[in-house]
């Protein structure tokens, strides 16, 4: 499975010269993602399950597509993965070099940014159906903080670029202005596993020679499993519905 990501990247790098856009295009979009966070984290082989609050995160992205042969298209997407949570640990819990005794009431603030740097090729594209294939460098950067009721506190810094495979497909529903789409980003490597996927429905609100505006809604889920990455062990899930808009010049 370690070879999965690199196989996708190599496949994308050797596609034919037909894998680009017909003309230069700029895409910009934004989404409101209602995120439900669940899971556990810790360090030194101890983890604790936290009850996290639910919140709305903003997702922003830009993409550039072009007709230059063999040069990949580029998409950059950014959002925060932020949540507050609490728990009462039943056994000893260690994090950030601090040991918390069994029965401790803990609170946490999880504030990590998630930035995707995606290089992809349009391996198939017409008015009804499109497929994009490439690689995604997902950069997780931020802090996880823990505090107990007595004021003892600890934190760990997470800063890691991780290589994922990238696949997106979209199909238009003729004569309706509607389309359906799905996207998968995936990594399994050295005990780490990340799956970031979404699916939804789009509506072509404005379609002119100069500009297109699309509305979309759907569901996105992101699962992050880390095995001693920057001293952090974690199994965290972020999922929920989203709505958004995209403009294409």
Image (cartoon, grey):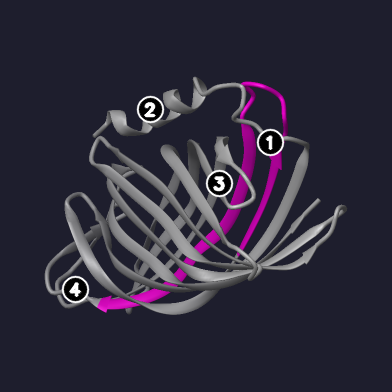
> Picture coordinates of residue 9 (x, y %)?
44, 28
How dense is the environment of label 1, judged by Cα within 10 Å: few (below 14), some, or many (20 and up)? many
> Picture coordinates of residue 32 (x, y %)?
60, 72
Confirm or deny contact between disc 3 and disc 4 (CB under 8 A): no
Nearer to me, 64 or 33: 64
Residue occupying image coordinates x 12% and y 69%: 91
Circle 1: element type:
loop
Residue 241 numbered tag? none
Residue occupying image coordinates x 23% and y 40%: 191
Q: Nearer the viewer, mark 2 or mark 4?
A: 2
Question: In the displayed structure, does residue 12 sit left or right of residue 27?
Answer: left
- How far apart are the two marked residues, 3 and 1, measured between alpha carbons? 11 Å
- How far apart are the two marked residues, 1 and 4, measured between alpha carbons? 54 Å
Nearer to me, 130 or 99: 130
Question: In the displayed structure, does residue 46 sit left or right of residue 63?
Answer: left
Q: Which residue lies under the disc numbered 2?
A: 6
Q: Which residue lies under the disc numbered 4?
A: 89
Q: In the rendered structure, which segment of residues is drawn in magenta?
A: 59-87
- How far apart are the two marked residues, 3 and 2, measured between alpha carbons? 22 Å
Q: Main secondary structure of the magenta part?
A: strand
Q: Which residue lies under the disc numbered 3?
A: 130
Q: Which residue lies under the disc numbered 1?
A: 21
Q: Does the stretch in magenta take in 229? A: no
Q: Does the stretch in magenta take in 66? A: yes
How dense is the environment of label 3, judged by Cα within 10 Å: few (below 14), some, or many (20 and up)? some
Residue occupying image coordinates x 66% and y 63%: 30
- Quadrant location, the N terminus: top left
Residue sitting at the far left: 91
Residue occupying image coordinates x 76% and y 46%: 26
Closer to the N terminus: mark 3 or mark 2? 2
């Amino acid at each position: 499975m370690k070879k999965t990501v690199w196989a996708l990247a190599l496949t994308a790098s050797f596609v034919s010269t037909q894998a680009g856009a017909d003309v230069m295009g700029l895409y910009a979009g934004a989404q409101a993602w209602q995120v439900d966070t669940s899971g556990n984290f810790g360090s030194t082989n101890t983890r604790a399950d936290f009850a996290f609050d639910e919140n709305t995160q903003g997702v922003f992205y830009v993409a550039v597509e072009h007709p230059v042969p063999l040069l990949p298209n580029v998409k950059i997407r950014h959002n925060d993965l932020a949540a507050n949570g609490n728990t009462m640990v039943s056994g000893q819990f260690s994090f950030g070099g601090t040991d918390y005794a069994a029965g401790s009431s803990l609170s946490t603030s999880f504030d990590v940014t998630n930035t995707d740097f995606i290089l992809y090729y349009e391996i198939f594209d017409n008015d009804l159906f499109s497929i994009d294939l490439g690689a995604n460098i997902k950069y997780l950067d931020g802090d996880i903080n823990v505090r107990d009721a007595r004021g003892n506190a600890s934190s760990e810094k997470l800063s890691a670029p991780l290589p994922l495979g990238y696949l997106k497909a979209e199909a238009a529903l003729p004569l309706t202005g509607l389309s359906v789409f799905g996207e998968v980003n995936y990594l399994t490597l050295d005990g780490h596993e990340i799956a970031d996927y979404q699916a939804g429905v789009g509506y072509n609100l404005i379609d002119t020679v100069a500009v297109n505006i699309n509305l979309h809604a759907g569901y996105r889920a992101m699962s992050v499993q880390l095995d001693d990455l920057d001293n952090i062990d974690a199994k965290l899930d972020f999922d929920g519905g989203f709505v958004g808009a995209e403009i294409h010049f």
